[in-house]
Amino acid sequence: MKARLGFALVVVLAGATAFVGSAPATTTSRASSTSSGASFSATPVLAWSNEARRAIVPPSAGPENFGNKFPGEAAVYMGIVHAAIYDAAVAIEGGYRPYAIALTASADTSAAAAVATAAYDTLIGLQPALGLNPSQQAILDGDYAAYLAAIPDGAAKTNGIAIGEQVAAAVVALRANDGREKNPTVADLGPPSPGPGVWQPDLSRPVLGLRLPGIRPLALESASQVRPDGPNPLTSEEYAEDFEQVKELGRLDSATRTPEQTTQALFWTDHDIRQWNDGMLRLAAARGLDLVQTARMLAMAHVAGGDGMIACFDAKYHDWFWRPYQAIPQADADGNPATVADPTWRPLRTTPNFPEYPSAHACHSTAVVETLDAFFGTDKVAFTLDSRVTGTTRDYERLQDVVKDVDWARVLVGFHFRNSDQQGSNLGRKVGDYVVDHFFQPLG
């Protein structure tokens, strides 16, 4: 048992290993190294958090992955699975309010069997909307079978499986008919008539995030609960300032963006759910968090991250605001004398195919940061993230440094106006605060 779980931890941390890289003023760079081992009791959570990520995130974000979800939807699925992992850990360790079902495991219960079964059965229960084809599901099935086979047979294993099955059934029932199974079109979401300020989809590529506004949140009362006021008016001075900033810094051939800023911009074009989960697993290991602490930290972060994405795309498909790659060439029609069109303008990388306002990276990252801040009781938490796009690692001294990094990166890559990043972070902060105030609380 110990040998198997120790191996699982090594696999998790090896999969999350980062690389050498440059960093902004708020970070430091260093050579990568494997994180120190976590408390033995936390290894099932680390292993099955990693497995959930692999089953949700696509291979384009790393060959170990076998899922299908772009970051917006991936965040929601990660939230659901980690809520199940949390309930299994709470059933064994106690001390916290459950998310979906209150259970008390017997003293003779295998945490490894309980956590693995809760995660696996939840992932299977989220099919077919999870989108795994038969060969992809076979990978998940095989990983679960191999993990269970390494746990000695007996009452503890049987009890653990039973706890995991009950947790997964409750979580899956809670998410029944939650909107994940729907397939709306652009027209179904009621787009405004084309014109200045209105985002137009690139129909040569899949339009992403159409389901998200209609998915029932994991914690919030509604997707529109924290909807921001909307983008700056096209004729405003604030819009003109943001326009000029992204026009200069975010263009493909920018003469003013520094090499360090280019690395910063490209760093965050990785699949951010993969980035965040690997970073949080390293953090849990480095801090020596136990079973329930690790499960609680990850559940808080991923539930907030999932709702951050739902609320963000609700706002995106409410405001339908155009992207810089559309706004800058068409500036002659925006009614603002301070903006000048440039038909040759292109962003540093291909822009995601959904509306601009607010920034999804800002919504998600800030929601996660807000929960981590609350979990540790301080913003001063050393944190490391890596990017497989740039092959670099960024070390942050404070959690809020990550938010600042993300907000600037989306301008530097040419995807967002500065206001959209700031408003996305405001949205994410509200989501994180709501999750912290209403879920995963200590008993008593």
Image: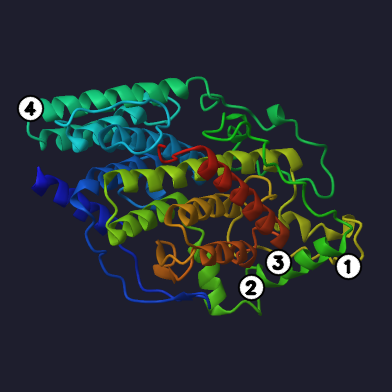
Q: Amino acid under label 1?
A: Ala
- Residue 290 horizontal/vertical position (percent): 27, 49
What residue does disc 4 label?
154
Mark 3 or mark 4, whichever is nearer to me? 4
Mark 2 and mark 3: Cα distance apart in space:
12 Å
Give coordinates of residue 308: x percent, y percent.
57, 44
Mark 2 vs mark 4, CA separation in Å:
64 Å
**CA neighbours of label 1 inside 10 A, class few (<14), some (14 to 19), many (20+):** some
Closer to the chain start, of discs 3 and 1, is: 3
Q: Is residue 61 left or right of residue 410?
A: left
Q: Secondary structure at mark 2?
A: loop
For the N terminus, the quadrant is: top left
For the C terminus, which image quadrant? top left
Q: Find out whether the residues at labels 3 and 4 contact each other: C-beta distance under 8 Å.
A: no
Residue placed at 60% from the left, 49% from the top? 428
Considering only vertical position in the picture, is 391 above or below 167? below
Vertical arrangement, residue 126 with respect to residue 315, above or below: above
**Disc 3: which residue:** 246
Which residue carries the number 2 mark?
Answer: 253
Q: CA distance from mark 3 to mark 4?
A: 61 Å
Mark 1 and mark 2 in contact? Answer it, CB < 8 Å. no
Q: Which residue is mark 1?
A: 338
Above-or-below relation of 347 to 60: below
Q: Name the residue at 37% across, 24% down.
A: 125
